[in-house]
Image: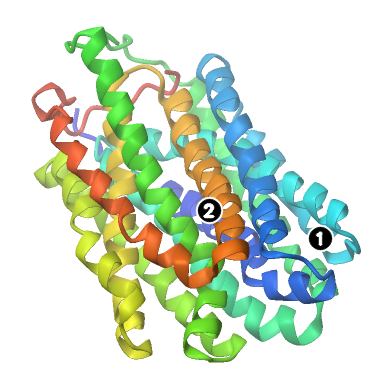
Amino acid sequence: MTLQPRFRVLGAISFSHLLNDTMQSLMVAIYPLFKSGLHLSFAQIGLITLAFQFTSSLLQPLVGLYTDRRPQPFSLAAGMGCTFTGLLALSIADSFPLVLMAAAMVGTGSAVFHPEASRVARMASGGRYGLAQSIFQVGGNAGAAIGPLLAALVVLPHGQGSLAFMSLLALVAMLVLIGVGLWYRHQQRQPRPAPKSTHNPLPKGKVRTTLGVLLALMFSKFFYSASLSSFLIFYLMEHYGIGVRDAQFHLFLYLFAIAAGTLLGGPIGDRIGRRQVIWASILGVAPFTLMLPYVGLGTSAVLVMIIGFMLASAFPAMVVYAQELIPGRIGAISGLFFGLAFGLAGVGASVLGLVADHWGIETVYRICAFLPLIGLIAVFLPDLRLNREPRGVAEPARA
């Protein structure tokens, strides 16, 4: 029987992802507020990013492994409660250690949210896994783009305490996720088809090698992304001499391009193959990253949009490619890849913060410009399309 995607469920989970990542991106967008108010160095700014992203990366694979065996429909709302608590704590934090603790709480919320939300997206896909993953992820990217605008319009003018008002977004998300949890629980109670074979036709050695290639590509993508998401504001202010609000607008353009790339990356992968999308998006961005440190302000805005669009199109394809590479481990793979996304970005922000403190923020962009060349190793990814499940086959509710 051919199934259609459950767009209402996909819309709800994407909207929740939007609210979740809006709140997370507020942290990045108000770094100048923390830096001036608490007299922080670039290295300490990087540690804030590390705190919430490392917490998320450490816990996400563990959450995914657990929920592969015991799905938890209402863990989505519980995870959003952690984000709500962390944002409230950020609104009153008056020292660097307290900011780190609150950031870690926000990271914990993401660790609980992402693996199960990715599973729900696959359950509601109707067999169009790339499309479902893109709809889910684009909500998060749109939220990441909205965050800097809210910071510029609300938080920066009204101060750190206004983060408490922003935490109301978490309450809205919790209500939506309770509804998603009810649908999820209903799916669990339905008669299930016979489990599909989880045997992988590729040799184990080839699977390990392919996974290693994917992880190297993840490193390239998210280390470079960390240079833009964490330090683009400071780079623009120093290199071009513009103000904070103008720099915030450029960050919004970059994050908006990421949202657009995420939305298209999954469906394109469904049609032409995920390997091709991964290859083109990682390596294809190299000419633009190499140009970025040497152009004017207007051209840089265009380049960061191109870079954001191309890099973002890879991630939905990577997640679904890995799910097909290791079938039967949807939660674990989703947790691993979303966790690595946060963890690599956090480590990248910390390392690049140290580089910026010692050699200047412009040096960061000259060094990172070469990272996309790692995309050359995508040639070693096997084409999994011949082993792909037929389109329109329902995903079992339990992996």
Is 310 located above or below residue 149 in the figure? above
Disc 2 target residue:
17
Q: Where residue 136 sits: x, y (%)?
A: 42, 50
Report the label total.
Answer: 2
For residue 393, which quarter of the picture?
top left
Q: Where residue 391 sits: x, y (%)?
A: 17, 33
Which secondary structure lies at badge 2? helix
244 relative to 166 in the view: left or right: left
- Quarter of the C terminus within the rendering: top left
Q: Given the image, on which type of amino acid does mark 2 rest?
A: His
The residue positioned 55% from the left and 58% from the top of the image is 355
The residue positioned 52% from the left and 29% from the top of the image is 186
The residue positioned 36% from the left and 46% from the top of the image is 220
Q: Nearer the viewer, mark 1 or mark 2?
A: 1
Q: Where residue 95 sits: x, y (%)?
A: 89, 60
Viewer-proximal residue among 353 and 304: 353
Visible residue check, residue 5: no
Q: Where residue 166 sits: x, y (%)?
A: 73, 68
Q: Earlier in the sequence, mark 1 or mark 2?
A: 2
Which scheme is used to colour this image of the protein? rainbow
State if disc 2 and disc 1 touch (CB < 8 Å): no
Task: For label 1, count other residues whose C-alpha is less than 10 Å away and answer few (under 14), some (14-19) or many (20+).
Answer: many
Distance, label 1 to label 2, CA atoms, is 20 Å
Q: Given the image, on which type of amino acid does mark 1 rest?
A: Leu
Viewer-proximal residue among 340 and 106: 340
Viewer-proximal residue among 248 and 353: 353
Disc 1 target residue:
90
Visible residue check, residue 1: yes
Which secondary structure lies at badge 1? helix
For residue 343, which quarter of the picture?
top right
